[in-house]
């Protein structure tokens, strides 16, 4: 008959009818079984602004390891999470563009020795989508036209892009929108007739570049025509 006792005074009984009382346990055998820790993330690589969660899975022998896991970024302790069925998690939240080193350390329990694992989380720039509009359209030849740009960050990315959006009309007129302070700029169509307007965003450290679909624009004559000195 084998029985595990705690340090101190403990009791036990057996089905054969005999009873052992006041067993004095002076020492316990240290943990000797090896454990394994595997660290993963919900998405690797991820993109700027995306929520990421680290998961440490601790395995052992015949029984499930218990205890807790320390999560670190480089050498900085992020926190300690208890194991549940051999698994512990830690939410990182949205991450900035670049490479980040994380580690998970299992301290061990009465049965299992400690173990650990690490990973490099790669965070890429988030994709963007650019849309363009112009008003009024059609416009009067020579009058200013407000060109508005809408730059969206595609899921699962998040954040606020910065930098210029370049706007160019096929007739040669151009203007620039500076993000995030501005959302529009002014174009002047000096030539009457149909033109196209294009826009592009060059990207920044955290967001990728994008090009807006081309839009059409028409500039009509001013309506003021003079013949023989008289307004028509």
Image: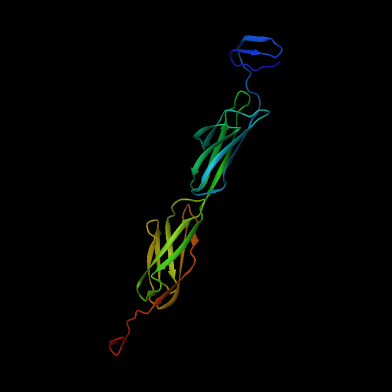
Query: Which residue is at a point 43% across and 64% down the rendered structure image?
Result: 166
Q: Name the spot of residue 150 as percent of width and height, x first.
A: 44, 60
Q: Quadrant of the C terminus?
A: bottom left
Task: Identify the residue shown where x is 38% and y is 65%.
Answer: 185
Q: Classify residue 193 by image quadrant.
A: bottom left
Residue at x 65% of width, y 10% of height:
20
Front-most of 98 and 84?
Answer: 84
Q: Residue furthest bottom?
A: 228
Viewed as shown, does residue 92 lie left or right of 185?
Answer: right
Residue located at (49% from left, 59% from top): 129
Q: Is residue 136 above or below residue 222?
A: above
Q: Residue furthest left?
A: 229
Count of picture labels: 0
User: Is 203 placed above or below 32 here?
Assistant: below
Q: The N terminus is located in which quarter?
A: top right
Q: Is residue 88 above or below residue 135?
A: above
> In the depicted view, which residue is nearer to us: 55 or 104?
55
- Residue 168: x percent and y percent? 43, 69
In the image, residue 163 lies at what x, y percent? 42, 57
| 182 relative to 37 in the view: left or right | left
């Amino acid at each position: 008959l084998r029985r595990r006792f705690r340090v101190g005074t403990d009791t036990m009984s057996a089905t054969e009818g005999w009873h052992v009382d006041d067993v004095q346990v002076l020492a316990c055998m240290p943990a000797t079984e090896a454990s394994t820790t595997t660290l993963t993330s919900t998405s690797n690589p991820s993109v700027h602004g995306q929520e990421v969660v680290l998961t440490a899975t601790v395995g052992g022998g015949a029984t499930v390891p218990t205890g807790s896991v320390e999560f670190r970024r480089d050498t900085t302790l992020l926190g300690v999470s208890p194991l549940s069925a051999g698994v512990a998690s830690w939410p990182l939240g949205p991450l900035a563009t670049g490479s980040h080193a994380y580690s998970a350390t299992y301290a061990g329990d009465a049965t299992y020795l400690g173990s650990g694992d690490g990973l490099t989380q790669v965070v890429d720039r988030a994709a963007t989508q650019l849309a363009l509009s112009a008003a009024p359209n059609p416009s009067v030849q020579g009058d200013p036209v407000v060109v508005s740009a809408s730059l969206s960050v595609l899921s699962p990315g998040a954040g606020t892009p910065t930098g210029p959006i370049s706007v160019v009309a096929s007739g040669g007129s151009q203007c620039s929108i500076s993000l995030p302070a501005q959302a529009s700029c002014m174009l002047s169509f000096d030539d009457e007739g149909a033109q196209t307007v294009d826009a592009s965003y060059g990207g920044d450290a955290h967001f990728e570049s994008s090009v807006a679909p081309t839009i059409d624009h028409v500039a009509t004559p001013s309506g003021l025509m003079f013949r023989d000195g008289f307004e028509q």
